[in-house]
Amino acid sequence: MDLRADAPEHRRRRTMKLDAVSKFSLLDRIRQTIARHDMFKRGMKVGVAVSGGADSVCLLHVLCELDLRLYVLHLNHNLRGADSQSDAEFVKMMSGSLGLPCTIAEARFDVAGNLEQQAREARLALFRQSIASDLVERVALGHTRSDQAETVLFRFLRGSGTAGLSGIRPVTAGGIVRPLIEVDRAEVEQFLRDRGIRWREDASNADRNFARNRIRHDLLPQLGREWNPAIRQCLAQTAQWAQDEESYWGVEIERLSAGLFTRGNGFVSLKTGLLLAFPTAVRRRLLRRAIELAKGDLRGIEFGHINTVLDLASRPIGHGRVRAPGIEILRSLDWLRFAILPEPQPYRLPVAIPGKLPIPGTTVSICLDLIEKPETSVLSDYVYNEGMDGLDWPSLSGPLAVRNWQPGDRYHPTGSTGEKKIKTLFQRARIPSWERRQWPVLLDGESIVWVRRFGPAAAVAANSGSTSILRVQEVEGN
């Protein structure tokens, strides 16, 4: 036997055998993930979210080997022109070749807003609608262990706690499942190459303007080279650890809160003494749970918000208020009350003099009255004390109205060297963003002549020579 002649064939057969083991290993691991998390039942109607990229294409072909009724879901974001349309056509053709029904949904976005967030919400809306309409029972997404590592690192860099570090969950309460969550992106692409399966590349995945792409292409490879070659596996294990921690604490906090919280229509209340009886770690989780119950979610709630509420609760006695995105926490005596904030509504209200004008969406009222000042009296006896301001009445031409602050508003406050953007004044005074949208300004015609907390405009401010003064006072209570 000519061993040299046989060698290439021997190596080829050995390579084919190794490839077969590799394929089996990947499929076997995915099946184990599906079984471990009880993702599907035999014959279940499953929607497969397919973008056309490698991960979702691999997911679709893997699920085709299971005893499931599959339905392909694709959202055309219409953000990349002809490429977006080509992605949709690709998914449609692939679904047809596999004999699977396919829904192509269209989306339009506000280009001035956060496109990533809008796109994510549009996809989730499609998945929820598909489940709610009974088109499918669950929706499978193609997130991999590589996505998990990127998510955990991204959230760590933003300062997330354990809940954030739990990353992408294999199964959600809403019916979303992720069968590829324990395999790497490189394995997915090799699987497709070995089988000669085509996929689409999204050019935006290489755009370094997106933080996630910088993490994927720059930071993670650097950490792998210089610190830990198994960094992706390490981050994925961190997510698993955090998920287990959150699962335990979820049950424990639910048990504890059952005897602590008083729930009503749109609010949750809690006695401060009961809260403070627990260690700080438990207090924080109880506060997060109270906010979640009252608000419906924890979006926008940060570590600083929770600590501020803890400080409020820790005072021996007293009253106070903390506003966080979408929710207001009030302290009264020994109670904390968590109540959802109504969506802010634009307003423009005519002014009656004298009169008291409650400001929509706030606990503030504006009181206005006209006073006559004797020439011999001092201006400070009438205005500029106890939250009062004064405008020179003859300098106003009318009509007067109060409306909410709007982006771009500017005026020249008394004592300032010139015109200022009100947004700049908010930032200097550290006014939280969720308080700004209902912030009252007083108009003379279309000119801003007074702004809550920042006072009258220089051109119309009452002065020592003013004898007829419009007094403006902000007071708590409607």
Image (tube, rainbow, N blue to C red):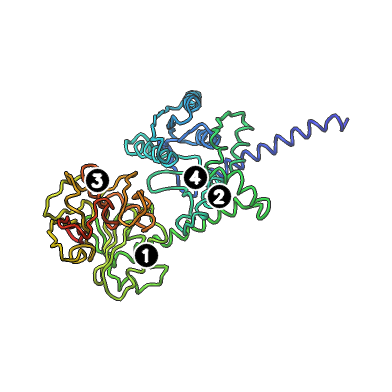
Disc 4/disc 2 C-alpha distance (Å): 20 Å
The Cα–Cα distance between marks 4 and 3, rounded to whole angstroms, is: 46 Å
Upstream in the sequence, badge 4 or badge 1?
Answer: 4
The percent coordinates of residue 225 (x first, y second) are 68, 50
CA separation, marks 4 and 1? 42 Å
Q: Give whichever of discs 2 and 1 has the lower sequence position.
A: 2
Q: Amino acid at mark 2?
A: Ala
Pick the residue in front: 470 or 429. 470
Which amino acid is tagged 4?
Ile
In the image, residue 70 sits, relative to residue 375, either above or below, namely above
| 262, 63: nearer the viewer | 262
Residue 31 in sight: no
Q: Amino acid at mark 3?
A: Gln
Question: Residue 58 location in percent, x, y?
Answer: 54, 35
Q: CA distance from mark 3 to mark 1?
A: 27 Å
First-in-chain label (4 vs 2): 4
Residue that numbered label 3 is attached to: 345
Residue 34: give its label: 4
Q: Residue at x 60, y 52 (%)?
A: 233
Against 452, is 125 above or below?
above
Amino acid type at image mark 1: Thr
Disc number for residue 1: none
Q: Is residue 141 left or right of residue 362?
A: right
- Residue at mark 2: 149
